[in-house]
């Protein structure tokens, strides 16, 4: 068991958007004032750019563009990385059980993200693809190639149809971005196998009255127009109620036959938080106070999708997003450091700059500070946001290396990550 020394130890669980940010901020601050031992724990040895997974799934970018090795990110930083899966939290005893042994802590940051919510819909979990990780994205990519190739050799139209029908359950940002990206790729794949692209059907099934809830109506209208031009069928008011093998049943009795159902709706937290004694609320997210500390255990902070954070302006929970997870990680890094040097902590205020949604390889829609953008300006904003994030976590060097990735991968380091292309 790793034990505590004289130096206060902070353990950060999860090297995603929230956890990485917490660790980096804490390390930056503690450099100036005195040492803190920081241990960052993650199942994977890389940081995932989840916001780029739809591009990996479609094959528009290589997986190296959606993962950054942690050795690369943490080089020269006083952060110890432990590659392990977190199995249990013993909060009263201030220790964490992982697949690589136990780790004791003085302060803990839980940033373990979320998993897909299937809402108890029969067959959904067993029969669908998800898009939560680079591995998931590569599974989808491989499936697209497999079914299109099989369809090319299938003379029976009835058997061929489900192979060329692609269904995305969920018309939120993730579902729409994925659909648009696949709509660019599938015709290319079809042609490569001698299939007329008009035989490919790509559908979004959305339970609500319209896609992209919360996005301004003019931008939703534009998104629908772009999707329609790309031959994506949007069916609103059409929740999936049951999946039986390759049959996807929709409320009202209609059913679609597909070999590729992608579940892009709903997130929830795993059982780890609740079974460890944390007080949890909607979708299993841990309830936190304004400093993002759990209400049951002081010095245990929760950020990102795992936290049920209330917006003080509205009193309502903030939506899970990478943008907010980064802000929360940044704040918690500060608050833990402030505690360690007896300075006042800061209460959380969510800052949402806006939303940027890509609709395939060329089009982007954005709402930034209440203003709506499309076309080149929106595309530029998306690229700027991505570059800004990379700069924030890795400075100019990371940015330069990332931009130079095209052929070489992470300077040959990509082989060290545990994600492999299938
Ligand atoms: C396809 C997709 C597209 C998205 N696009 C956007 C977007 O464009 N903009 C936006 O703002 N948000 C977007 N989101 C939402 C955003 O990705 C999440 O809100 C964000 O990742 C949450 O950050 P986090 O730090 O809480 O969790 P994550 O970033 O998911 O990090 C959790 C980390 O914990 C690790 N982990 C999990 N369980 C364990 C365990 N038991 N042991 C050890 N390690 C573990 C994981 O490996 C991971 O590294 C998207 C989500 C998806 C799925």
Image: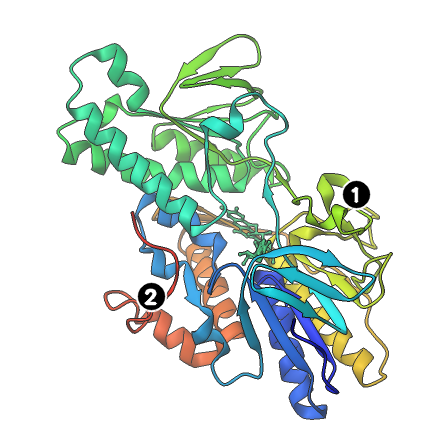
Q: Can residue 266 be seen in this view?
A: yes
Q: Which one is nearer the viewer's eye here, 15 or 256? A: 15
Q: Residues within 10 Å of mark 1 (few under 14, many from 20)?
A: few
Mark found first going from the N terminus, 1 or 2: 1
Looking at the rendering, in which quadrant would you find the N terminus? Answer: bottom right
Relative to 348, residue 177 above or below: above
Identify which residue is drawn at 53% across, 32% down. 170
Quote the CA–CA distance across marks 1 and 2.
38 Å
Report the side of 120 relative to 348 (left or right).
Answer: left
> Does any atom of ligand 1 lie closer than 8 Å to the CB of label 2?
no
In the rendered image, the residue lying farthest to the left is 194
Relative to 390, residue 288 above or below: above
User: Mark 2 sits on what residue?
Assistant: 414
Secondary structure beneath disc 1? loop
Relative to 304, residue 35 above or below: below
Q: Position of residue 89 (x, y in %)?
A: 72, 57
Identify which residue is drawn at 30% across, 40% down. 142
Q: Residues within 10 Å of mark 2 (few under 14, many from 20)?
A: some
User: Mark 1 sits on what residue?
Assistant: 281
Secondary structure beneath disc 2? helix
Report the side of 49 relative to 420 (left or right).
Answer: right
- Picture disc at residue 256: none
């Amino acid at each position: 068991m790793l034990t505590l020394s004289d130096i206060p130890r902070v353990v950060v669980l999860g090297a995603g958007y929230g956890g990485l940010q917490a660790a980096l901020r804490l390390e930056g601050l503690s450099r100036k004032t005195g040492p803190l031992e920081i241990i960052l724990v993650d199942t994977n040895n890389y940081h995932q750019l989840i916001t780029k997974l739809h591009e990996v799934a479609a094959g528009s970018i290589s997986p190296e563009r959606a993962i950054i090795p942690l050795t690369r990110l943490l080089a020269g930083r006083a952060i110890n990385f432990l590659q392990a899966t977190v199995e249990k939290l013993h909060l009263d005893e201030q220790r964490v059980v992982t697949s690589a042994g136990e780790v004791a802590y003085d302060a803990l940051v839980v940033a373990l993200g979320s998993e897909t919510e299937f809402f108890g819909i029969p067959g959904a979990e067993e029969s669908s693809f998800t898009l939560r990780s680079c591995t998931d994205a590569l599974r989808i990519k491989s499936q697209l190639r497999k079914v299109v190739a099989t369809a090319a050799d299938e003379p029976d139209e009835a058997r061929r149809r489900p192979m060329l029908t692609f269904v995305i359950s969920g018309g939120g940002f993730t579902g729409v971005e994925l659909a648009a990206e696949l709509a660019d790729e599938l015709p290319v794949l079809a042609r490569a196998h001698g299939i007329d692209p008009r035989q490919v059907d790509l559908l979004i099934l959305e339970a609500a009255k319209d896609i992209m809830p919360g996005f301004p109506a003019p931008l939703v209208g534009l998104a629908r127009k772009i999707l329609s031009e790309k031959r994506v069928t949007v069916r609103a008011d059409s929740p999936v109620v049951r999946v039986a093998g390759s049959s996807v049943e929709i409320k009202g009795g209609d059913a679609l036959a597909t070999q590729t159902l992608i579940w892009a709706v709903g997130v929830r937290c795993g059982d780890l938080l609740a079974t460890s004694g944390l007080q949890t609320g909607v979708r299993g997210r841990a309830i936190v106070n304004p400093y993002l500390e759990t209400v049951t255990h002081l010095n245990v902070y929760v950020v990102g999708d795992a936290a049920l954070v209330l917006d003080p302006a509205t009193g309502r929970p903030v939506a899970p997003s990478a943008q907010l997870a980064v802000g929360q990680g940044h704040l918690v890094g500060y608050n833990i450091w402030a505690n360690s040097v007896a300075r006042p902590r800061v209460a959380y205020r969510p800052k949402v700059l806006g939303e940027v949604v890509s609709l395939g390889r060329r089009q982007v829609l954005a709402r930034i500070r209440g203003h709506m953008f499309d076309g080149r300006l929106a595309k530029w904003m998306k690229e700027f946001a991505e570059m800004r994030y990379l700069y924030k976590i890795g400075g100019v060097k990371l940015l330069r290396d990332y931009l130079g990735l095209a052929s070489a991968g992470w300077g040959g380091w990509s082989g060290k990550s545990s994600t492999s292309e299938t």
